[in-house]
Structures are given as structure tokens and as C-alpha cells.
Image (cartoon, rainbow, N blue to C red):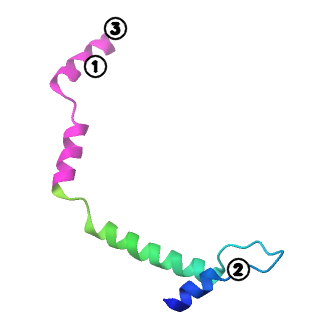
């Protein structure tokens, strides 16, 4: 980890674009993919899935309002 910090803290040579080199970008990309894959594997908790389902269902009052708008 100390080597990683040392590489990222080096100043760019004069006239160069700067930024992160390809090796550092690849490491960051690999770590981000690993973290993202872990989050995706966890799935959505049942509590959130139920809330989303309830939000997708039209409420009783809304159904009548939508039907009357379609008739007009």
C-alpha cells in the first residue's frame, strides 16, 4: 500500500499531461469492479422490494382519476 501511495504522490514531469498512469487506473478499475460485484450479489433487501412494489401499484383514488381523464 505504501508503494501505491508513493506512486500516486509523484509529481508529473514538466510538460506532461499529469493524472494517473495506466497501472494505477487499472488497479482502481479492478477494485471498483470487485466492490460493485459484491453489492450486486447482495441483492435488494425484502423491505426495500416491498416498498418499491407498493410505490408501483396505483392507489385507489388515483385509479379513478386516471380512468376519468382517459374518458375526457
Residue 6 versus residue 53 in the image, above or below: below
Residue 9 versus residue 62 in the image, above or below: below
Percent position (x, y) of residue 65? Answer: 25, 16
**In front of the other: label 2 or label 1?**
2
Helix, strand or loop status at disc 3: loop
Report the disc number at residue 14. none
Query: Is 61 situated left or right of 71 in this image?
Result: left
Percent position (x, y) of residue 63? Answer: 21, 22
| Magenta stretch: includes residue 40 | no
- Kindly report the secondary structure that dominates the magenta region of the rendered protein: helix
Work out how far the residue at label 2 is from the one at label 1, CA to CA, in angstroms: 62 Å
> Dividing the picture into quarters, in which one does residue 45 lie?
bottom left
The residue that label 1 is drawn on is 66
Span of residues in magenta: 47-72
Q: Earlier in the sequence, mark 2 or mark 3?
A: 2
Query: Is 42 situated left or right of 14 in this image?
Result: left
| Magenta stretch: includes residue 71 | yes
The residue that label 3 is drawn on is 72
Helix, strand or loop status at disc 1: helix
Query: Is 28 situated left or right of 22 in this image?
Result: left
Work out how far the residue at label 1 is from the one at label 3, CA to CA, in angstroms: 10 Å
Q: Residues within 10 Å of mark 3 (few under 14, many from 20)?
A: few
Residues at marks 2 and 3 touching, judged by CB atoms closer than 8 Å: no
Percent position (x, y) of residue 70? Answer: 32, 15
| Image quarter hosting the C terminus | top left
Q: Earlier in the sequence, mark 1 or mark 3?
A: 1
Amino acid at each position: 500500500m505504501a508503494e501505491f501511495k508513493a506512486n500516486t504522490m509523484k509529481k508529473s514531469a514538466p510538460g506532461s499531461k499529469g493524472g494517473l498512469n495506466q497501472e494505477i487506473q487499472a488497479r482502481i478499475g479492478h477494485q471498483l469492479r470487485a466492490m460493485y460485484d459484491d453489492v450486486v450479489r447482495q441483492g435488494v433487501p425484502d423491505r426495500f422490494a416491498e416498498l418499491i412494489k407498493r410505490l408501483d401499484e396505483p392507489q385507489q383514488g388515483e385509479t379513478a382519476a386516471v380512468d376519468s381523464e382517459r374518458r375526457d
